[in-house]
Amino acid sequence: MATGRVARFRDEEDGAATILVLFLFLFMFAMAGLGIDTMRHEMERAHLQATLDAAVLAGAGAPRGTDKAEVKAIVEDYFAKSDMASYLHDIDIDGEGSDDIVTSLNSTKVKASASMTLDTYIMKLSGVDQLNAYGAATAEVRTPKLEIVIVLDVSGSMKGTKLLNLQAAAKEFVTTVLNGSEAGNTVISIVPFSWSVTPGWTIFNALAVDRQHNYSTCLKFKENDYNHATLTTGASALSSGIPVDHMIYTSVYGGFDNLDPEWRSCYTDAYMEIMPFSISETALHAKIDSLEASGNTSGHQGMNWGAALLDPSFRAVSADLIASGEVDGTLSTVPANYNEPETLKIIVMMGDGANTTSYFFDKSNPKYRGAHSDLYHVKYQDRVFKYAYHDFKHTKSDDESKCGKSKWTCVYEANGPEMSVYYLRDAGDDRFYAAEADDPEVANNWISTAEFNDLENTLEGYISTERLTWEMAWGLMSPEYYGDITGDWGPWNDYVGSEYLSGSAKNTRMLGVCSATKTAGVVVYTIGFEVPSGGTAETTLTSCASTLNHYYPASGTDISAAFNSIASNVQNLRLTE
């Protein structure tokens, strides 16, 4: 009987489904519990990481000069306000631990970690009582050492309100970037340009220049000098090769010693000189306020000098600037090497129009270059009669009338300052014109060639004659003046029609140096100030900029917004890990 009941129980199948369902329920319950605990873990971990990210960013973004204890307090405050203070690990200070807060003159780096332990709900049934969540974050606010060159178009079209708006915007830019870093960490140079760019005499004398005159310092670069970021090629100024050309100083128009200022090839005024490597807000503002607008446009020259002032090779020149007291002695490593990780090099170029044509005397056919010009500098001095003496008897007389008699010699002595007269030779009429003289009775008079060749007798008090080089002559007179006086318009035709440089050629050279300096690692921002949309000027400036986003069109007072936007980009705030 018993055996039969056991057999029936063995053969009964009605409870099998119940056992299976119970097993599946327990399995699903365990999986659901695992999912719940896992989801809670991920949510809390994400919250912990988000708090870490925000905290280290806030700490790293503290103002320059904030000490480490204050940075640490900022991070701790973030966790306290999130009710997570107990999860934050200690943030060590230098000398106490792992240097999780690192500050320098131009950057703050904060590293923090946190962890938490979660009690499980369901997973404990499988023997997992707790889950650990861990997070770490590093943030760095870098205000790199900045080397900035502001290249400014001050051609004649900038006169009036445009120049005033530029000056206000540029000064605000200077203040913003200087205040954004420790003193001495931001170095700013200003390069004004119109017909050309005017380096100071210290820069000029530091370079190998084929010096031709004493009037100005502008240089005339070769075409291939615009294909690299250094100032010159291996055959020019910073090399042991052929010196760079000294640009002739003259003007298309103007009278004698009165060159038309709007058409000068080079501007000698202090306001037009390059201001190199300044860390003084006061000095930079004064320079910007001094700017005046005049002349035509040579943006290629502005960019060439801007790139040169950021190129490491220019340290050979900056050493002389420091020695002369023009640049602060702390800047001996400026310009820094391109690969210096803590230095950001920036050019900000503002242009208000397309490049225009410049003129030069033809150096390949130097009829109006070199020695033996048609201009002569004659020195003389008023004299007064002192006495006459007899050549044989050696007797003296106070009678000046004896000077014209045989056997009598008269002695005169200087009376008053030494004077001069410039004589311009008219080869066609074989005579000489007194272009300028200290004595009004001598000025503006013509004399014959015979009289000029006998000045000892025809010019009272004659001292000496110097025949000027053409380079020295053109610094005193324009080709127009030469033509007006002599009737010979050969110099005029040579100057405006032989070796000119068109606006199109300048654009090509400008883009060449823009490309070279960008390749070297310089960030180039450009501003088109009231230039026609889609025109030549805007196209050139857009191509010169590092990217399309680095070009800013501006008009009126909106130029301040362009400069402000650029200033805000020179500080680099980033989450590094």
Image: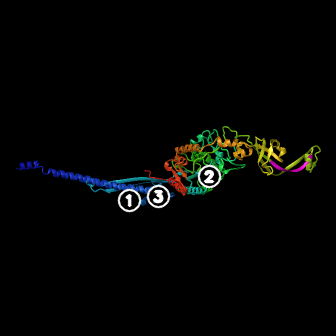
Assign the magenta stretch its main secondary structure: strand
Q: Which quarter of the figure has residue 427? A: top right
Magenta residues span 380-389
Q: How many marks?
A: 3
- Label 2 close to label 1 by CB (< 8 Å): no
Residue named by callout 1: 86
| Nearer to me, 10 or 36 | 36
Find numbered disc 3 in the image and state the secondary structure of the residue it sits on.
helix
Residue named by callout 2: 156
The amino acid type found where label 1 is placed reads Ser
Find numbered disc 1 in the image and state the secondary structure of the residue it sits on.
helix
- 36 on left or right of 466: left
Q: Name the residue furthest left.
A: 1
Q: In this view, does 289 lie above or below 221?
A: below
* Residue 99 seen anywhere in this rendered image of the structure: no
- In the rendering, at what x and y percent does residue 435 appear? 76, 48
| Nearer to me, 374 or 150 | 374
Q: How crowded is mark 2: few (under 14 residues within 10 Å), some or many (20 or more)?
A: some
| Nearer to me, 339 or 484 | 484
| Marked residue nearer the N-terminal end (2 or 1) | 1
Q: Which mark is residue 71?
A: 3
Q: How crowded is mark 3: few (under 14 residues within 10 Å), some or many (20 or more)?
A: many
Q: Please name the residue shown 76% across and 42% down the image.
A: 426
Examine the structure image and report whether residue 387 is included in the region drawn in magenta: yes
